[in-house]
Image: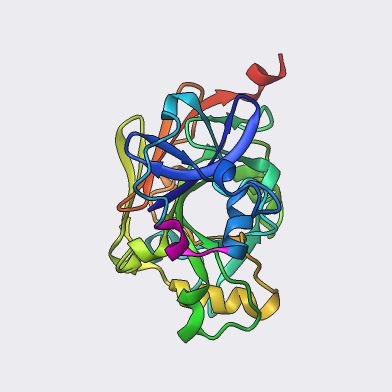
């Protein structure tokens, strides 16, 4: 079962994504939730509660809605760097004893089928296909053996990176937070529908050419370790997002380098989770 956030006729809501369209849960549960968001739903209800809606007919076609980032305004987005061995090697980084963590701001995100924006400040706009975790049960100092119980589900993420700005100092933050550079969606695929996340494949395609290809069992720090570590220095809350890292093959480490440019179509495809598609435009096009 998959959830999505969307906008229709100026109204934001969330619902169940079916093959032929959307079941509007925001409308059906409006008297039971503080707002029509996935995070509000997760704070009150669970997977079993959703089953009563699963066989309803779709209220809208996908052509009737505009996708929003799965969690439009998460309290935290924690991103894990250098978490596949091939990517660590191509960046020539040392083996680390702990996860490399940086943050992305919620207002830098776009949704499925929306534009990723190459900033005027750089020509080194790179792709990073990743699996995102959405927290469904908050907690602090979560032990690894219990960590999977804190996951609501998974989604696709493209952590678009402005490589020269990322390297201005040892801190990644500037290169990871230009407006409209991180894509998130299209769905939150509920954890209960994924038997074993380690068997999921992740593939990034640029203009239909495969540029990244990996399996989730190749993560250096697995998902329970990531959740446990992140919760040790900060309290994880419902709706928080953890982006688990990108495989090798990023454009910046290719010979010659391969950066995103106007007109490109970039896709992140994770088996059983979804396919996130975005189109690239120049910042100057949205400023005029």
Q: Is residue 129 visible?
A: no
Give coordinates of residue 140: x percent, y percent.
66, 80
Rendered view: 57 above or below 201: above
Rendered view: 149 above or below 251: below
**Figure quadrant of the C terminus:** top right
Give coordinates of residue 249: x percent, y percent.
38, 49
Would residue 280 appear left or right of 240 to someone viewing this image? left
Residue in view at x 69 percent, y 31 percent: 121
Rendered view: 185 above or below 202: above
Give coordinates of residue 69: x percent, y percent.
57, 43
Would residue 119 appear left or right of 129 to someone viewing this image? right
Q: Is residue 111 visible?
A: yes
Q: Quadrant of residue 119?
A: top right
220 or 75: nearer the eye?
Answer: 75
The span shown in magenta is: 45-51
203 or 171: nearer the eye?
Answer: 203
Residue in view at x 46 percent, y 86 percent: 145
Colour basis = rainbow
Specify whether residue 46 is painted magenta.
Answer: yes
Residue in view at x 70 percent, y 74 percent: 234
Looking at the image, how many numbered discs can be counted on the residues?
0
Specify whether residue 47 is painted magenta.
Answer: yes
Q: Residue furthest top?
A: 288
Give coordinates of residue 169: x percent, y percent.
71, 55
18 or 75: nearer the eye?
Answer: 18
């Amino acid at each position: 079962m998959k959830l999505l956030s969307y906008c229709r006729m100026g109204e934001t809501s969330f619902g169940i994504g079916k093959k032929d369209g959307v079941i509007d849960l925001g409308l059906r549960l409006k008297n039971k939730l503080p707002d029509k968001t996935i995070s509000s739903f997760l704070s009150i209800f669970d997977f079993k509660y959703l089953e009563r809606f699963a066989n309803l007919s779709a209220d809208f076609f996908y052509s009737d809605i505009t996708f929003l980032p799965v969690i439009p305004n998460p309290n935290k987005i924690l991103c894990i760097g250098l978490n596949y061995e091939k990517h660590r090697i191509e960046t020539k980084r040392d083996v680390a004893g702990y996860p490399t963590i940086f943050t992305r701001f919620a207002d830098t995100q776009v949704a499925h089928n929306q534009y990723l924006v190459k900033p005027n400040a750089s020509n080194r706009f790179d792709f990073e296909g990743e699996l995102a975790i959405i927290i469904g049960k908050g907690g602090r100092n979560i032990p690894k053996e219990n960590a999977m119980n804190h996951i609501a589900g998974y989604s696709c993420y493209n952590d678009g990176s402005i490589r020269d700005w990322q390297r201005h100092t040892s801190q990644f933050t500037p290169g990871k937070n230009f407006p409209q550079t991180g894509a998130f969606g299209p769905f939150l695929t509920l954890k209960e529908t994924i038997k074993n996340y380690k068997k999921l494949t992740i593939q990034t395609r640029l203009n239909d050419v495969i540029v990244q290809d990996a399996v989730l069992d190749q993560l250096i720090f697995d998902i329970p370790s990531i959740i446990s570590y992140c919760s040790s220095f900060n309290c994880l809350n419902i709706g928080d997002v953890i982006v688990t890292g990108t495989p090798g093959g990023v454009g910046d480490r290719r010979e010659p380098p391969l950066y995103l440019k106007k007109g490109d179509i970039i896709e992140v495809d994770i088996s059983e989770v979804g396919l996130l598609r975005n189109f690239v435009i120049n910042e100057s096009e949205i400023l005029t």
